[in-house]
C-alpha cells in the first residue's frame, strides 16, 4: 500500500482515488470520488460512508459548501505543481467554510511545495509516486517563521512584532 | 533605510539553506530540470544565452554603501567584474556558475539582500519613485508601504504559483509618476481623500509585454490600513480565475479586460468583504514601526544656493549643464538630489563595473549618508547631497563616467540587455543604443530637443519598456535577421499611454538615421514650449510616417 504524509507523519494510504470519469460500482473500502460523481450520487454515498471527494483545479470549492458536514476528507488535485489554484481553494475551505476534516493534496505533489501547502490548510499529502514521502517530509520544515497570516499562523508578523 | 530584525534575518537565511538543498538535489538528479526551474526562477536564477543569470532584488531601489561593496565583491569573485541595473530596481549578475549561487546568496543575506521572487510566476520586487522621501512634492514617503508589501508578498503561501508574474509599483508624487504605476499589474498611487485621510488610488491590469495595456482604476480611495487585505483580494481573484492555458494570455491585464473592470471590481469587493476587518488589516503601530526606518537623516540647517556653488556654475558651463540636467530639487534647503547617469556612450545602459560600484559606495559615504537609490531608468541616485559639495562630486563623477549630463534626454536610453546576453531576445539592443548615442553626441542640440524618453527592448517581453517610451524601439526577428520596429507616443507617467507603431521595421544600421528623421519632424513642427510628446500628440503620426517612409528627402 502506498504511503502518504498526514499530520507530519508517514502513514499507509488506505484510500483509493477514483478517476474523474469513473462510473459504475464503487470498489470496496474508503474511496475518494470525483466531484461530479459525488454530486450525482450524494445520498447513496452518504449512506455508504467511507467516502471523500476530490476537486480538480478548475472545480470551485464553493461546490462543496453544503456538503462539508458529510465529508471527513476533501482532496484537491494539482494537475501540475505550477497550477496554484488549489492553494486558494484550500484556504477558502478552511478559513471561509471552516472545514475541519482532512484536507489532502493529490496529483503533482512534491517536496518543495509542501511548506506552502501546509500553510494554506492542507494536512495530508500524497507525494507523487516516483518520489520518497520520507524525503519530501523535510519540505515541511523549510522555514521556521513567516510574514503573513494563513491557516497555520492566524497572526501576521507585523502584529506579533508589535506584541 | 529598513534594517532586518531577527525575523527577517532568519527567513532570508532559511531561504538560502532551502535553495542550497534544492540545488544539491538538482545536481544529484533528485529534482528534475522542469521541477527545479520554477524554484530557481523564484530565486532570480535564469539560464541565459551564455551562462545562468542571477537577478537580485533592490527593494524599492534602496542600497547602502555596504551593499554596493558586496555587489562589487560578488562581481569580482563570481562574475566577470560588472553588474547590470535593470528597469525594475533589480541588479543582475550575468555570468555566475550555478554551483556558486547558494554561496552568493549567503553573502547577500549577510548584508540584508536577497534574490527572492525576482522572477517566476509570483509577486515580484515592489518598485517606487527613486526620489521618494527627498522631494517636497509627495503625499507621504512611499517606501515604508513598499517594505510592508515586500514582507507581505515574501513567500506568500497562496500566491507562489500564480498564472503569471505579478508586479506592484507605488507612487506618492501628485504631479509626476516616476514609478510607471499605470503599467504594472497593480499600481498604487498614494493620495489623501477629501477628509485629509491617507490612502491609495488602486490601478489594476496594466502591463507591457506582448499585450501592452494601461491599468484601470479599481478603487478611487482605499484607506491606508486596508492595503494588504485589498491586495490579497485582488491577487486571490487573479489566482483563481486568471488564464493558465496560454502564457501569453495569463497576466492579470487579460483577465481584467475579459471580465471588464466593473466585474473584476465586484469580485474583488465580494472577496474582500470576508476578511477586510481580519487579522491582516494593518495597524497604525505596524506602519509606525516600518516608518521609523525611513526617518530623515541628520540634515544640517543650510541655505539654498550657497555663493560658491552659484559662482562655479557661472565659471564652468559644463558644471552648470550637469546641475541643470542631472540635479533635482531637494525638500531641504541647501541639499540636492543627484542622478549619476549610467548612460555614457559606448557603455551598455545600466552596466557598472566592480570598481565603479566601489566608487559609488565611496561617493555615497562621503556625500549622501551612505545610501543610494537605483531608478527604473537604470541610473544611480545620491539623494542627499549638500549643494556646497556638488562641484567636488561632479569632478569625481565626471572622471568616473557618471556625469554625462543627459538625464531625461534622448540619449538617456532605457535598454534591456538584449541579444548580447538574453536568451529570450529576438535582437540586440545595446548596439542600437550606442548607435543613437553616437549620432546625437552634441549636448547643446540634445538640450535644445528637451526631454525625450527613448526606450529599447530586444523582444516583446518589453524589459526595456519600449511601449511607454516617447520613442520606442522593439527588436524583432524576421526570418533569422534582426529588425527593429519603432513606436511613437508612449508615456510612462501620469498620462500613461502605449506608443503606436510607426510602420514596417528597419534594419539595424538604419536605426540612428530613422531616429534622426523623427527628431527632425519634431523640430520642424514644435512650438516654443512643446516637448516631443506634446508635438506628437498635436500633429499625430502622419508627418513622422511620411518623413521616415517617404522617398528621398
Image: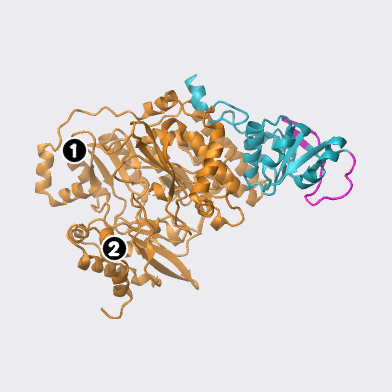
Chain colours: A cyan, B orange
Residue at the spot of label 2: B536
To which quarter of the image does residue A138 belong? top right
Depth-wise, is mark 2 or mark 1 nearer the camera? 2
Residue at x-position 30% and y-position 46%? B176
Residue B417 visible to the viewer: yes
Q: Position of residue B385 (x, y in %)?
A: 24, 37
Residue at the spot of label 1: B387
Q: Confirm whether the magenta stretch covers residue A80.
A: no
Residue B511 against residue B123 in the figure, above or below: below
To which quarter of the image does residue A98 belong? top right
Residue B27 against residue B544 in the figure, above or below: above
Name the side, left or right, on which A114 lies relative to B193: right
Q: Confirm whether the magenta stretch covers residue A25.
A: yes
Q: Secondary structure at mark 2?
A: helix
Quarter of the image for the C terminus of chain B: give it.
Answer: bottom left
Q: Position of residue B170 (x, y in %)?
A: 39, 41
In terms of secondary structure, what is the magenta stretch mainly?
A: loop
- Asked whether the residues under the numbered discs 2 and 1 touch, taking CB atoms below 8 Å apart as contact, a structural biologist would say no
Residue at x-position 89% and y-position 44%? A27
Residue B101 against residue B251 in the figure, above or below: above
Name the side, left or right, on which A7 lies relative to B366: right
Q: CA distance from mark 2 to mark 1?
A: 36 Å
Residue B293 against residue B392 in the figure, above or below: above
Q: Position of residue B284 (x, y in %)?
A: 42, 25
The chain ID associated with circle 1 is B
Dot 2 or dot 1, earlier in sequence: 1
The chain ID associated with circle 2 is B
Residue at x-position 12% and y-position 36%? B306
Q: How dense is the environment of label 2, judged by Cα within 10 Å: few (below 14), some, or many (20 and up)?
A: many
Region of the chain picked out in magenta, as a range: A4-28
Amino acid at each position: 500500500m502506498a504511503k502518504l504524509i498526514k499530520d507530519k507523519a508517514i502513514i499507509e494510504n488506505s484510500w483509493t482515488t477514483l478517476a474523474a470519469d469513473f462510473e459504475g460500482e464503487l470498489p470496496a473500502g474508503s474511496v475518494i470520488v470525483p466531484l461530479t460523481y459525488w454530486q450525482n450520487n450524494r445520498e447513496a454515498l452518504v449512506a455508504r460512508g467511507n467516502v471523500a471527494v476530490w476537486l480538480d483545479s478548475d472545480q470551485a470549492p464553493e461546490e462543496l459548501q453544503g456538503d462539508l458536514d458529510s465529508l471527513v476528507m476533501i482532496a484537491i488535485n494539482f494537475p501540475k505543481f505550477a497550477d496554484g489554484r488549489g492553494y486558494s481553494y484550500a484556504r477558502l475551505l478552511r478559513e471561509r467554510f471552516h472545514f475541519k476534516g482532512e484536507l489532502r493534496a493529490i496529483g503533482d505533489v512534491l517536496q518543495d511545495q509542501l511548506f506552502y501547502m501546509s500553510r494554506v490548510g492542507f494536512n495530508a499529502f500524497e507525494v507523487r509516486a516516483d518520489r520518497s514521502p520520507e524525503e519530501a517530509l523535510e519540505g515541511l520544515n523549510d522555514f521556521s517563521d513567516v510574514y503573513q497570516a494563513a491557516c497555520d499562523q492566524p497572526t501576521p508578523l507585523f502584529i506579533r512584532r508589535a506584541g | 533605510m529598513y534594517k532586518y530584525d531577527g525575523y527577517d534575518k532568519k527567513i532570508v537565511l532559511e531561504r538560502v539553506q532551502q535553495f542550497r538543498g534544492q540545488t544539491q538535489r538538482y545536481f544529484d538528479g533528485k529534482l528534475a530540470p522542469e521541477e527545479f526551474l520554477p524554484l530557481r526562477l523564484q530565486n532570480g536564477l535564469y539560464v541565459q544565452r551564455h551562462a545562468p543569470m542571477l537577478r537580485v532584488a533592490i527593494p524599492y531601489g534602496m542600497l547602502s554603501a555596504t551593499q554596493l561593496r558586496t555587489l562589487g565583491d560578488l562581481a569580482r569573485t563570481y562574475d566577470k567584474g560588472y553588474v547590470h541595473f535593470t528597469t525594475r530596481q533589480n541588479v543582475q549578475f550575468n555570468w555566475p556558475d550555478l554551483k556558486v549561487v547558494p554561496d552568493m546568496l549567503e553573502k547577500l543575506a549577510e548584508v540584508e539582500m536577497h534574490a527572492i521572487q525576482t522572477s517566476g510566476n509570483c509577486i515580484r520586487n515592489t518598485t517606487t519613485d527613486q526620489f521618494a522621501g527627498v522631494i517636497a512634492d509627495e503625499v507621504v514617503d512611499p517606501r515604508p508601504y513598499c517594505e510592508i508589501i515586500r514582507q507581505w508578498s515574501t513567500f506568500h503561501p497562496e500566491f507562489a504559483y500564480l498564472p503569471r508574474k505579478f508586479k506592484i509599483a507605488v507612487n506618492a508624487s501628485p504631479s509626476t509618476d516616476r514609478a510607471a504605476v499605470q503599467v504594472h499589474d497593480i499600481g498604487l498611487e498614494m493620495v489623501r481623500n477629501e477628509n485629509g485621510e491617507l490612502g491609495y488610488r488602486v490601478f489594476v491590469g496594466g502591463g507591457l509585454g506582448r499585450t501592452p495595456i494601461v491599468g484601470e482604476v479599481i478603487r478611487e480611495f482605499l484607506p491606508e490600513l486596508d492595503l494588504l487585505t485589498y491586495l490579497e483580494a485582488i491577487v486571490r481573484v487573479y489566482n483563481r480565475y486568471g488564464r493558465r492555458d496560454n502564457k501569453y494570455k495569463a497576466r492579470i491585464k487579460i483577465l481584467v479586460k475579459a471580465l471588464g473592470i466593473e466585474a473584476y471590481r465586484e469580485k474583488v469587493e465580494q472577496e474582500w468583504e470576508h476578511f477586510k476587518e481580519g487579522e491582516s488589516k494593518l495597524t497604525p503601530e505596524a506602519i509606525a514601526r516600518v516608518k521609523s526606518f525611513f526617518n530623515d537623516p541628520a540634515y544640517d540647517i543650510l541655505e539654498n544656493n550657497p555663493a560658491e556653488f552659484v559662482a562655479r556654475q557661472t565659471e564652468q558651463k559644463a558644471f552648470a549643464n550637469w546641475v541643470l540636467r542631472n540635479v533635482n530639487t531637494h525638500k531641504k534647503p541647501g541639499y540636492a538630489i543627484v542622478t549619476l547617469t549610467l548612460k555614457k556612450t559606448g557603455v551598455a545602459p545600466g552596466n557598472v563595473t566592480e570598481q565603479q560600484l566601489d566608487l559609488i559606495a565611496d561617493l555615497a559615504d562621503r556625500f549622501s549618508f551612505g545610501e543610494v537609490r537605483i531608478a527604473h531608468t537604470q541610473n544611480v541616485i545620491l539623494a542627499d547631497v549638500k549643494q556646497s559639495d556638488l562641484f567636488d562630486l561632479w569632478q569625481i563623477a565626471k572622471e568616473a563616467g557618471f556625469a554625462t549630463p543627459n538625464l531625461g534626454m534622448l540619449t538617456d536610453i532605457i535598454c534591456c540587455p538584449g541579444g548580447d546576453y538574453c536568451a529570450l531576445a529576438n535582437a540586440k539592443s545595446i548596439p542600437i543604443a550606442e548607435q543613437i548615442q553616437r549620432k546625437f553626441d552634441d549636448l547643446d542640440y540634445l538640450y535644445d530637443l528637451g526631454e525625450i524618453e527613448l526606450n529599447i527592448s530586444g523582444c516583446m517581453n518589453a524589459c526595456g519598456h519600449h511601449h511607454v517610451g516617447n520613442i520606442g524601439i522593439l527588436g524583432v526577428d524576421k526570418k533569422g535577421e534582426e529588425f527593429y520596429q519603432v513606436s511613437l507616443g508612449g508615456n510612462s507617467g501620469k498620462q500613461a499611454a502605449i506608443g503606436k507603431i510607426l510602420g514596417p521595421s528597419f534594419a539595424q544600421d538604419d536605426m540612428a538615421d530613422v531616429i534622426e528623421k523623427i527628431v527632425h519632424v519634431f523640430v520642424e513642427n514644435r512650438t516654443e514650449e512643446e516637448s516631443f510628446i506634446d508635438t506628437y500628440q498635436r500633429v499625430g503620426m502622419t508627418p513622422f510616417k511620411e518623413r521616415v517612409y517617404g522617398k528621398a528627402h
